Amino acid sequence: MRDSRRARLILGVLLTAALLTLTVDHRTGGASPLRPLRAAGAWIFGSAEQFGGGVARPVTAFVQAVIAAPAAQKRIQALMEENAKLRAGLVTGRLDAGRAGELKELLGLAGAGGYKIVPANVVARRGQPGFEDTVQIDAGTMDGVRPEMTVLNGDGLVGRVIQASTGTSTVLLISDPASAAGARLEGGKEIGVVHGVGEHGRLVQFRLLDSTAPLNRGGRIVSFGSQNGRPYVPGVPIGVIERVESTPGELTRIAYARPYSDLTTLDVVGVVIEPPKRDPRDAVLPAKERAR
């Protein structure tokens, strides 16, 4: 009980002293003798507040970051997907523009030769049992494509169809060693056979049947044509002779030609579903070369 009374007495004295101190400090204003004490207290408690805030801010920021992380991740993912779509759109636009140009060239060549064609895209390059150089195209029997039809692009002869299903077909390229196509030298009646030699289609072999006929570097070769236009229609540009081999005493002459069609980068091609009404001869050859 005594302790309780003593504590209340001490508390009363302290409260009275505090009240007197506040009264004196308020009435004397700037001249208060307690001003240095008040400044010291403000500095002590202000520093403590700053320290507490400095400690609390990183913790608060961390908590906020943890809370916002899932939303931020979703936003980042959405932006990445949007950027991927934009890049894909740009690539598709460039591809579409490139294919449109190839289709225009293909239709120009087909028109010059009088070939009725079905345009198609090369969708795969694959080997076939017994063959080395074949490609798959996205046109088939429902488009009118049949085996033993000529395939060309805007530059020249590509090959022939060897298999056809409902929606796709397999094309044997003229670069395949198993390929053989009747051919003719530009401006004459000398004929021969073009064989594939592999080498990724860089060259094809031209065997001229008349060993006495002139055969020179720079000469150009077109398809001779087959009966009823199958497997090859006439007049399709094949290539330009780059090298002539010496074959003394043989019945034929051999040369190697660079194909007009780049057989390593095929994209848009056309299948000739109807041959021309008459042989176009050399009319389909590039005009600038023909005028040389």
Image (tube, helix red, strand yellow):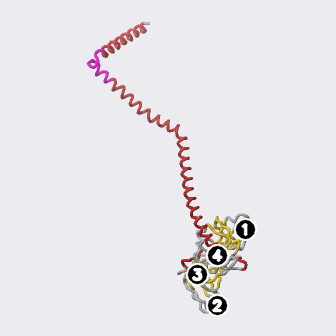
Labelled disc at residue 113? 4
Q: Which residue is under mark 1? A: 144
Q: Amino acid at mark 2?
A: Leu
* Disc sitting over residue 251 in the figure: 2
Q: Which residue is mark 3?
A: 220
Ranked by sequence position, the earlier of labels 1 and 2 is 1
Report the residue at 56% width, 59% height from top.
Answer: 93
Q: Element type at marker 3?
A: strand
Instruction: Tell whether label 2 touches label 4 (CB within 8 Å).
Output: no
Spatial separation of the CA atoms under disc 3 and disc 4: 17 Å
| Residue 33: in magenta span | yes
Numbered range of the magenta stretch? 27-40
Residues 187 and 4: in front is 187
Residue 270 percent coordinates (x, y): 65, 69
Front disc: 4 or 2: 4
Q: Earlier in the sequence, mark 4 or mark 2?
A: 4
Marks 4 and 1 in Cβ contact (< 8 Å): no
- Number of residues whose C-alpha sits closer than 10 Å to that of mark 3, classed few (under 14), some (14–19) or many (20 or more): many
127 within the magenta span: no
Amino acid type assigned to the residue bearing label 3 in the image: Arg
- How far apart are the alpha carbons under marks 4 and 2? 32 Å
